[in-house]
Amino acid sequence: MSSQKLRNIAIIAHVDHGKTTLVDNMIKQTSTEREANNMGNLVMDSMDQERERGITIKAKNASIIYKDYKINIVDTPGHADFGGEVERGLQMVDGALLLVDAQEGPMPQTKYVMKKAIELGLKLVVVINKVDKPAANPTRALSLVEDLFLDLGASDEQMEFKTVYASGVQGKSGASAEALENDLTYLLDVVIAEIAEPVVEEMDSTDDFQLLALNLHYDTFKGKMAVGKINRGKVVMGQSLVLKQDGKDVTGKVSSILTF
């Protein structure tokens, strides 16, 4: 297992509230200059339809290295139409960033995803984004967020959320809308401080291994690959596993392991 400290977070936001742009800059600011120059834009929106329509349809993941932490980011769909993707993505994480436009405040699709996050008991951090807009009203946006939390039955602990102000397009964040720092360091520090490290239920036998798969990939050399979160147990090379997909059980053996 990796000795790096971990944080698993989801990003929750309405369409056009700047989620993909913010995540792009989080990735680029924590990458080498050469990597950042080769990335382009809309790193998380990998599907053609997502790039065309400017929305997130399928939950995806990315990882960044910041200080001695690995922060795994799950990009959740902002539409109730993709509810299955929303719930699966939220079950992968220990906390979430609620990204809200400083001019518009929380919107209806945000309410649906937030309801699921609150029901799962996730630790929440509020990010008031686009504070650089001419008509931005961060105070009003924050007040609407507080009302939303109350309406959704947030716990006392969830109501004590940390607030970060940001301009995703500028790649800046800070403790107030009037004094943004020149990068997203403040936001990343809040993630580390507020979101707990993931806990895996230890088991004596590999028979008890369970992984919740977020994404499935296929590689011509390695075969089928599953990216997900270990809920319990341990896995070893050559171990037989059962993949439950579309109501069917597919049996295979572990040929390689990459830990996050």
Image (tube, rainbow, N blue to C red):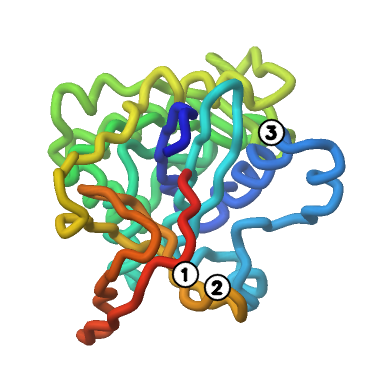
Residue under the image location 51 percent in, 78 percent down? 223
Circles 1 and 3, Cβ within 8 Å, touching? The answer is no
Q: Is mark 3 on a helix, strand or loop?
A: loop
Q: In this view, does 45 lie above or below 35?
A: below
User: Is residue 113 in view from this perspective?
Assistant: yes
- The percent position of residue 21, horizontal first and vertical second, equals 65, 48
Q: What residue type is labelled 1?
A: Met
Label 1 environment density (alpha carbons within 10 Å; few <14, some 14–19, many ≥20): some
Helix or strand or loop: what does disc 2 sit on? loop
| Amino acid type of the residue tagged 2 in the rendering | Lys
Q: Is mark 1 on a helix, strand or loop?
A: strand
Density class for disc 2 (Cα within 10 Å; few <14, some 14-19, many ≥20) is: few
N-term-proximal mark, 2 vs 3: 3
- Kindly report which numbered mark, 1 or 2, lies closer to the viewer in this rendering: 2
Which amino acid, mark 3?
A: Thr
Q: How far apart are marks 2 and 3 (CA)?
A: 29 Å
> Which mark is drawn over residue 225?
1
Check disc 3 and report the residue beneath it.
30
- Please tell me which residue is depicted at 56% across the width and 35% down the height of the picture: 129
* Position of residue 66 measured from the top left corner of the image (x, y, whole percent): 60, 27
> Residue at point 66% right, 18% down?
180
Side of 215 relative to 123 (left or right)? right
* Residues at circles 1 and 2 in contact by the CB criterion of under 8 Å: yes
> What residue is pinned by disc 2?
222
